[in-house]
Amino acid sequence: MMAALEILNDRYQLNAKLGSGGMAHVYRTLDLMLQRNVAVKVLKEDYSADLAFRERFRQEARSAANLSHPNIVTVHDFGLDQGHLFIVMEYIPGTDLKTLINERGKLSVSEALELMIQACQGVGYAHRAGLVHCDIKPHNFLVTPDMLVKVTDFGIARALSTISKDEKSDVVWGSPHYFSPEQASGLPPSPASDVYSLGIILYELLTGKLPFEGKDSAELSRRHRTEEPVPPTIHNPDIPEQLEKIILKVLSKEPSARYRTADQLGRLLQGFYETQFKLPSSNVLTGPSALGVTGVGQVFKAPATVEQGAVEESVSVEAQLATPAESRPLINEEASKPIDWFTWVLGIMAFIFLMGLVPFWIYIYQMIGR
């Protein structure tokens, strides 16, 4: 592939293959015009002639290009050369979250939360932009050496405006280990579908295991739809009880029983993180670096129009895990001020002086009256 496509559009010099997916190869590439490294995703030859796959590839480029966020991979360009469609994206050094899990087995609670809060930031931003990712899995989260998380691969993302609640599909898109029960049933996805998939990733980060395994996609689909997951504390007793409750709620079969958006889940995890590790509370969704945690990347603050329900969830967790500020004794600031004795003495002396003049004026008055 590279021998035939060493340079795309007389600009992008393919240097090394970074990986391959179901539809495309990804290369580390030098942008000859700007002299910077980028990542180029090239649609595989088998799919290049298929109009449906070509359109899906274009959709990925359009969806991601409209999203500008520190936790989402930036799309720079899109083109066609020598019969191959390609997407030019920012180059992210590091690895993907699945590789990190395979290497580490399971992560500590603090590490898992730091990564998941960032993942929720990126996916939550897409939700606010009117997109459902539909293929949330650890393979689609890139992790830099300083532990900054970037969401990628919006190849099957759906615009909320195009989703009908009555639609039914015989073709199930997504990854069987991570898709939601409604996706497994061919029902329309929603932001809560992405939340379910994020819950599976969090489960896997904390335990090193998936909640559902199966010999094929049909069995996995059935288990997502009908079986309850093994509580994560069975695999990792160090998981706090409150965090386990959050995970199990996220993995509810009914979308309405989960948190509605990734922002809402992110706020809840943020509140738990702050109270668990005794960090200052915050009313905005921020990256762990804003909380004084090392090794985490950029910070993004959600706009003031975030759903009220998300804020209420975060507050309720803090109320359960920490003493609310309202219950602390108030200090009477006036009573705590020191007494200004000098002013008091001057005042008393002035009063005595004035009182000493009273007999003098009475004497003068009597003399005038004679």
Image (cartoon, rainbow, N blue to C red):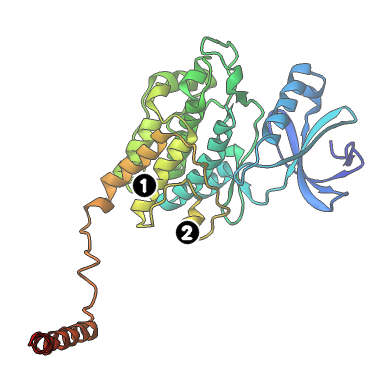
Q: Position of residue 360 (x, y in %)?
A: 12, 90
- Asked whether, in this view, residue 323 is left or right of residue 302, the answer is left
Query: Does 91 sit above or below residue 350?
Result: above
Task: Identify the image quadrant of the C terminus.
Answer: bottom left
Q: Nearer the viewer, residue 299 or 32?
A: 299
- Asked whether, in this view, residue 243 is left or right of residue 21, the answer is left
Q: Position of residue 59 (x, y in %)?
A: 71, 26
Q: Nearer the viewer, residue 217 or 358?
A: 358
The secondary element bearing badge 2 is classed as loop
Distance between the Cα atoms at labels 1 and 2? 15 Å
Q: Nearer the viewer, residue 171 or 326?
A: 326
Q: What's the mark number on residue 272?
A: 1
Q: What's the mark number on residue 31?
A: none
Q: Nearer the viewer, residue 326 or 213?
A: 326
Whether residue 106 is visible, yes or no, is no
Q: Position of residue 116 (x, y in %)?
A: 49, 44
The secondary element bearing badge 1 is classed as helix
Circle 2: residue type? Val
Q: Quadrant of residue 206?
A: top left
Residue designated by label 2: 293
State the residue lying farthest toward the front: 370
Task: Identify the image quadrant of the N terminus.
Answer: top right
Circle 1: residue type? Phe
Classify mark 2: residues with Cα within 10 Å, few (<14), some (14-19) or many (20+). Answer: some
Q: Quadrant of residue 65?
A: top right
Classify mark 1: residues with Cα within 10 Å, few (<14), some (14-19) or many (20+). Answer: many
Query: Does 158 sit above or below residue 64?
Result: above
Q: What residue is shown at x 73% (from left), y 31% (from top)?
A: 61
